[in-house]
Image (spheres, rainbow, N blue to C red):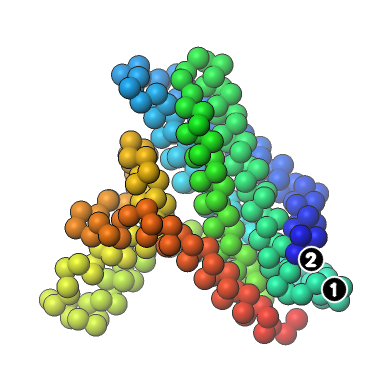
Amino acid sequence: MWRLVARKDVRDSIRERHLHIGAGLFTIVGLIAGFVYADSYDPTYVDQPGVQFLGVLVGVSLFLVPITALMLAQGRIVDKRSRGELVVLLGMPFSRRDVVVGSLAGRAAVTAAVVACLFAFATGVAALMLAPIPLARLVAALVVFAAFGALFVSIGTGISAAVAGTTRAAVGAVGVYLFFVFRLHNIVWELLVKGVYGADNVPRALMPVVAQLGPFAALRNVVVGIYPPIAGAFGYFGGPPPTDITLFATPSVGVLVLALWATVPLYLGLQRFEGADL
């Protein structure tokens, strides 16, 4: 039954022009990114053709995809709840789980579509300007960022399911984005560890561990572990790579961290939604 909810969600995104706005924004950014890459192409990268292009798209995607996914997802369930549409929907043979999973799937599909616009139009402009195109790596990057977008859709859906007001959902989504972008979890972890061990007795290995547990750093660890030349593209978002805790920087641990971020907030939101009085 969740598939029916997902289809309706996609249709709603078209009717409400969320898909149009997102696709338009990402198309414009893609055109600019493709032109910037082709216009500034450096032939000295001939040994690794297209690394510059991937770097541009990765940097843009790290900034735009998470906030877009969060904003697309954060109001989906709570908006239905505030308008009374959710009561009608649950009066049909749909469970609350169907609503949550269907909303997640629908918004993940919309996010993937707008990310595809970014990559497609950037590639088109670069190709027209005869710059080298690493097609296989571009397809892999598109899949990676569509999945990364789905992770933030999952977080946004969890927020939407957990709260009772649209303002709270919007504030929560923006707060989550800023929390990760400014790496505030590092500060929280540092305060926690110092509170437990004391400021002068903190085990050295504990401090940098949490820096690898955010979704941006985890994605960097996965991607760079598979394709090291792209490391520089993560810049500020990925944070400094670890030097003495290599276990936490492996791709396998990165995949586990990403999986936890994709599932735990959604599960917590679903549990709160299941017990909510609508």
Q: Residues within 10 Å of mark 2 (few under 14, many from 20)?
A: few
Element on which disc 1 rests = loop
On-image quarter of the N terminus: bottom right
Q: Position of residue 146 (x, y in %)?
A: 57, 47
User: Which residue is denoted by mark 1 in the rendering?
Assistant: 93
In the rendered view, would you say 85 is above or below 11?
A: below
- Asked which quadrant contains residue 203, the reply is bottom left
Residue closer to the observer: 196 or 146? 146
Disc 1 residue type?
Pro
Residue 1, label in figure: 2
Q: Residue at x 31, y 71 (%)?
A: 189
Q: Residue at x 52, y 15 (%)?
A: 129
Q: Residue at x 27, y 71 (%)?
A: 190
* 183 relative to 126 in the view: left or right: left
The span from disc 2 to disc 1 (Cα, nearest Å) is 8 Å
In the rendered view, would you say 41 is above or below 25?
A: above
On-image quarter of the C terminus: bottom right
Q: Position of residue 115 (x, y in %)?
A: 59, 42
Q: Residues within 10 Å of mark 1 (few under 14, many from 20)?
A: few
Between disc 2 and disc 1, whose residue precedes?
2
Q: Position of residue 88 (x, y in %)?
A: 86, 73
Whether residues under marks 2 and 1 lie with C-beta atoms below 8 angstroms apart, the answer is yes
Residue closer to the observer: 252 or 177? 252
